[in-house]
Amino acid sequence: MEYDILLCDLDAFFASVEQRDNPELRDKPVIVGGRPEHRGVVSTCSYQARAFGVRSAMPMSQAMRLCPQAVVLAGDMRKYQEVSRQVTKIYAHYACALEIVSIDEAYVAVPRGLGQEMGCLIRSRVRNELQLPVSVGVSVNKLLAKIACGLAKPDGIRCLLPGQVEEVLWPMPVETLPGVGPNTAKRLHDAGIRTISQLAQCSPDHLQAKLGKFGPVLYMYAHGIDERPLETEREVKSVSEEITFPEDKHDPAEVIATLALLSEEVGFRLRKHGLWAKTVTLKLRFSDFSTITRSKTLSEPVNTDSTIYHVARQLFVEHKGRPPWRLAGVQASNLVRDHLNQLNMLHGPDEVREERISRAADELRKKYGRPVLHRAGTVLLAKGERFVSGGKSKKPDGLSPCHVKPS
Amino acid sequence: MNIQVAQSSLLWGLNIVSRVVPSSSPMPILTGVLIETWKGAARLTATDLESAVQCTIPARIMQEGAAVLPLKLFAELVRRLPPQDITLSLRENEMVAITWEKAQYNLNGFKPDEFPKMMMVERERGVEVPADTLIEMIKSTVYAAASSEDRNISLTGVLVQVKQGKLTMATCDGIRIACISRDTDYGGQSYEFIVPAKVMQEVARLSSGVDDTPVKIFFTENQVLFDINSVLLASRLIDAKFPDYQQIIPNRYYTSMALDSNEFFSACERAALVPREGANYIRLQFSASGVVITSAASSVGTVYEEVPGVLTGEPLDISFNPRFLLDGLKVVLGKPLVFDGTGPSSIACISSPEFRDFFYLVLPLRR
């Protein structure tokens, strides 16, 4: 069966939720992100803020210079996740297949020919039931749906059919295509290829020679052809947390305290997904931006905070290099599901207590929506550094971004 | 020292003592074998300080004395010699001349008086066990000892308990306990001691092929000596407290099933092939008609197997790491099997009415 593919993207999601829940913020530039004095970055900004040139991922200090009157909010990840679930429910009602890309973006497959109609239904239901704007791109594959959605924004719907590729897609810069990052773009530019039209006129062989395996794929993209299926069930390949310190750390004890905090976060997410990790990886960035990752693979998979922390700490002690440190990260990978813990008759109160503590901390956290219990060692850190929130990116193998929230 | 020995008996002796010799050691003399004249024969000794092996071979003594040769090299040489008499004579500076026919090798040795003394174990307290019984007891338990890296050193050994009329061996690594008892004619006081598992494996190896000669076991506060048909194996005991395993033995079982051990073992072994990757468990569901064995690994496939059995008591749904289950089943292979359970997350027992005084307790995986 053939499908139409919709890309549904919630407009300025975090900011829209805040504006919805606080009428005073409507029509004002709203920025959700980390505080400038903590080297925070813009997570989302309302369209009113975008008018001043503020963009996602921009350092907050720069955003404040561009738009000093903006209302800056730390954001409430738990609320956004809940709203995202409500939106997904609406999508799922219409979807033959559904791929959740991120907290605010999803591909929806609907029967061929019904794309436009379903897109309008989804938009009106999200608007009526949740009071949120969502843009929808309609086409026959993920690539064109994504391009169409970009054209639909903000708060619109746009259909892009394969017959319109020459007219709509070709004038666009090559960077528009998925997978074309700064490196690929530079190589194409060096070859005099700036627009998708120029790309479409190259031969696939020529592109293969220039870009390797990705060349022919890109050639197909340029012609509006995209064979990627919807990834309906994303397998979690790794769980990771990292933090860029507000100021470079010189004291190893503070980095170790941070590792405890990150391990709690990683442990919580593993347990939430019912996963165990066989490999724990430490990531360290030094003040000169040089970065190392060091891993240890264990004989038995783990998911308690303390076991993850002990491995991360050991890796740090062995590979800490020279201070100061700029960033620390903890990753759990080599994940297994359905792991059953081996009971041990000699496991004393320590192991049992550790599991109980993890469980209790998880419960409290679910109740209050943020970590409530922390390891004593983390008191070394300034109060503002003790709250870490998971980023929205759960891309396989990627270290997800982490924001420092003001307390 | 000047002696003549047959190549075959020398090679036999070197093979026996070579098992305890470290290939390298901060004390180079420990890589050597002590050769000394003793009561009209030649005695070979090797040690790693934790344990020592000694055996005696026939020799013609021309001159009494002792020498220490690097064991590995010496054994390699002897292995390649023609099967005839060889003369070993000590020269200056600990050099030993090895002579046969028209050939002579001179090997540098170590000072014999610097060789660590074989542990002197008083032959006061002891027990005699037929070799085949001893092998059976060791093989039924030694696999369940903890690996030598375990933090709890008491678990890296085999607990030996000598009581009036009874000899018991037990091992425990925290996940399982293997325990076997056999009758003896020992009539003295009760003792218990922990022998390193590695040494016990060596005892089993040395005891195989000595026919019905009983193995004599002597023990003191901190040492044990096995006299296996005149081959002596001495070892330090593990100085630690073995956990009180008796208190872990359940008072009663709620589930009990009689099974054909061969059928059950094969089924479990097959089922264990599938979950090798990732989650590593097999699930056993005991009910009136028998036991259903299932396992699954998303990347490999799924398993379902039924083995008939006779259930007494409650049905039981329990999951194990297959390795720990199979280890215990192997001991009773070929005999009628009884599986006893106390609940889905508590201890289970494997035993056989035809293999008396043996039990294997194993903890499941938490559900």
Image: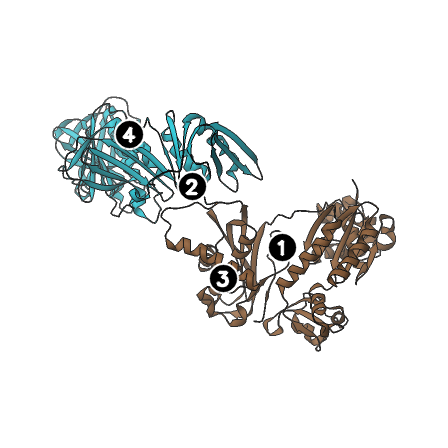
Chain colours: A brown, B cyan
Give the alpha-carbon distance from disc 1 to disc 4, as whole Å.
Answer: 56 Å
Give the alpha-carbon distance from disc 2 to disc 4, as whole Å.
Answer: 33 Å
Q: What secondary structure is marked by label 1?
A: loop
Callout 4: chain: B
Residue A298 placed where, x, y %? 47, 48
Give the alpha-carbon distance from disc 1 to disc 2, as whole Å.
Answer: 39 Å
Is residue A47 something one can see in this rendering? yes
Q: N-terminal of the two: label 1 or label 3?
A: 3
Mark 2 against mark 4, which lies toward the viewer?
2
Q: Quadrant of the N terminus of chain A?
A: top right
Residue A77 placed where, x, y %? 62, 63
Q: Quadrant of the C terminus of chain A?
A: bottom right
Q: Is residue B303 above or below residue B236?
A: above
Residue B180 placed where, x, y %? 29, 34
Q: Tell me the residue that label 1 is attached to.
A: A394
Residue B283 placed where, x, y %? 49, 37
Task: Please indicate whether residue A389 sits to the left or right of residue A182 in the image.
Answer: left
Q: Tell me the residue that label 3 is attached to.
A: A259
Callout 1: chain: A
User: Do dots 2 and 4 share one subunit?
Assistant: yes
Callout 2: chain: B
Callout 3: chain: A
Quarter residue A243 falls in:
bottom right
User: Do dots 4 and 3 share one subunit?
Assistant: no
Quarter residue A399 falls in:
bottom right
The tag on residue B343 is 2
Task: Please indicate whether residue B231 sits to the left or right of residue A258 in the image.
Answer: left
Give the alpha-carbon distance from disc 4 to disc 3, as whole Å.
Answer: 51 Å
Q: What secondary structure is marked by label 3?
A: helix
Q: What secondary structure is marked by label 4?
A: helix
How packed mark 3 is, by other alpha carbons closer than 10 Å (few <14, some 14-19, many 20 or more), is many
